[in-house]
């Protein structure tokens, strides 16, 4: 059956097909324009856990997402396919996460890990396996890019996109990152882990192709991170939650703020969305929730403006979704955000997503 025949035979008004790919769509990888690469990984988490289960939770919740999106009613016809992560990614995540816990505990007790040969050896192993993961992620992303697909990454904790950015850096000589998060993630080898989730944006700055990082919604940071920002010579622009809210309280609109944020970005943009950037009630089980944040609709409005701005969205990652023990809320929010972000990626790249439905 051809893709066109599948489109004609598929009823988007019914629940997604349980034996199909993400969102219950009937298309193969070859028939899909957008490939989602899941990375179930959370080795260096030091507070809440569960991000490695995010991709599976989002996949499960995606079958209940209505496919007639008001902004992108024809999006589903393009095809969105979730790749299968190598089994050793999840196995290594669990194995080395357990290995990391004694190191974190020693640091919390004020110990010097270097004085404990076993812990130092384990730390070296963790840094190596994390680097190996990023190399494998880069290779997987490149595989799909070489097939002409638009590729996005679904974490996992926020350390997971580094290999993704490296793959994009091999494709593009100059791009920026629109980073939505409660945290700056600019710590240098946080807790000794070179590839900590709290160090992702510091590690990204080591890629010369990334000319600008624009951070939105930040509300937790340390002195070291502020120093990194100040020494970046404008390469990192920060919009804290406090500053954004103050401006709003004094009359500045979200539209005006979004236009200013977008103006800071270069022509090509990758979005990095840590789900904890939103108000915690959207993601109550995420690893490091912080009071404050922005609404789901504020994020999607910013993305829509970016897609309509004339700048090119070259990809995105969505990370730190962690399912709860007794509810599917985080996965539900993550699935709907994933669908919307696929829509803005497609629209920015002039794919046919249909005309917005007006009532």
Image (cartoon, rainbow, N blue to C red):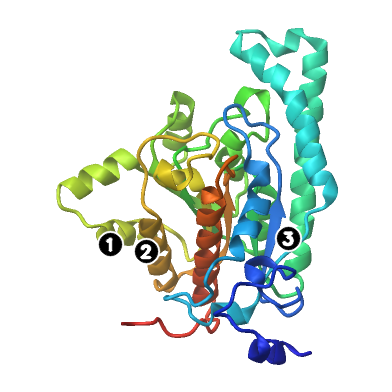
For the point 75% across and 7% down, which residue is it?
Answer: 115
Element carrying mark 3 = helix
The residue where tag 2 is placed is 301
Pinpoint residue 95: horizontal percent, then vertical percent: 80, 32
Q: CA distance from mark 2 to mark 3?
A: 27 Å
Element carrying mark 2 = helix
Pinpoint residue 348: horizontal percent, then vertical percent: 50, 74
Residue 159 in sight: no
The residue where tag 1 is placed is 255
Closest to the observer: 64 or 113? 64
Mark 1 vs 2, N-terminal side: 1
Pinpoint residue 188: horizontal percent, then vertical percent: 59, 29
Furthest-left residue in this view: 250
Pinpoint residue 177: horizontal percent, then vertical percent: 51, 54
Mark 2–mark 3 CB contact (< 8 Å): no
Picture disc at residue 141 = 3
For the point 78% across and 31% down, which residue is it?
Answer: 96
């Amino acid at each position: 059956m051809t893709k066109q025949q599948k489109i004609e035979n598929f009823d988007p008004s019914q629940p997604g097909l349980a034996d199909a790919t993400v969102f219950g769509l009937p298309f193969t990888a070859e028939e899909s324009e957008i490939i989602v690469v899941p990375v179930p990984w959370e080795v260096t988490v030091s507070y809440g856990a569960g991000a490695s289960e995010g991709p599976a939770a989002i996949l499960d919740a995606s079958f209940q997402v209505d496919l007639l999106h008001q902004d992108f009613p024809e999006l589903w016809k393009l095809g969105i396919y979730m790749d299968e992560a190598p089994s050793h990614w999840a196995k290594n995540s669990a194995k080395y996460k357990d290995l990391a816990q004694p190191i974190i505990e020693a640091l919390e007790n004020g110990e010097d890990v270097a004085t404990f040969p076993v812990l130092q050896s384990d730390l070296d192993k963790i840094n190596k396996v994390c680097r190996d993961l990023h190399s494998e992620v880069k290779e997987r992303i490149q595989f799909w890019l070489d097939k002409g697909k638009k590729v996005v990454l679904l974490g996992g904790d926020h350390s997971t996109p580094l290999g993704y950015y490296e793959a994009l850096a091999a494709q593009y000589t100059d791009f920026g990152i629109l980073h939505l998060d409660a945290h700056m993630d600019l710590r240098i080898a946080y807790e000794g882990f070179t590839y900590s989730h709290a160090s992702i944006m510091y590690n990204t700055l080591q890629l010369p192709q990334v000319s600008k990082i624009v951070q939105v919604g930040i509300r937790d940071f340390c002195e070291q991170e502020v120093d990194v920002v100040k020494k970046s010579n404008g390469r990192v622009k920060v919009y804290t939650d406090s500053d954004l809210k103050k401006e709003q309280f004094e009359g500045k609109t979200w539209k005006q703020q979004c236009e200013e944020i977008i103006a800071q970005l270069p022509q090509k943009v990758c979005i990095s969305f840590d789900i904890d950037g939103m108000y915690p009630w959207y993601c109550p089980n995420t690893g490091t929730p912080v009071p404050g944040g922005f609404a789901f609709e504020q994020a999607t409005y910013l993305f829509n403006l970016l897609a309509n701005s004339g700048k090119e969205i070259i990809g995105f990652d969505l990370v730190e979704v962690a399912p709860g023990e007794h509810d599917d809320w985080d996965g539900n929010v993550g699935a709907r955000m994933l669908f919307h972000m696929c829509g803005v990626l497609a629209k920015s790249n002039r794919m046919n997503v249909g005309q917005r439905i007006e009532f």
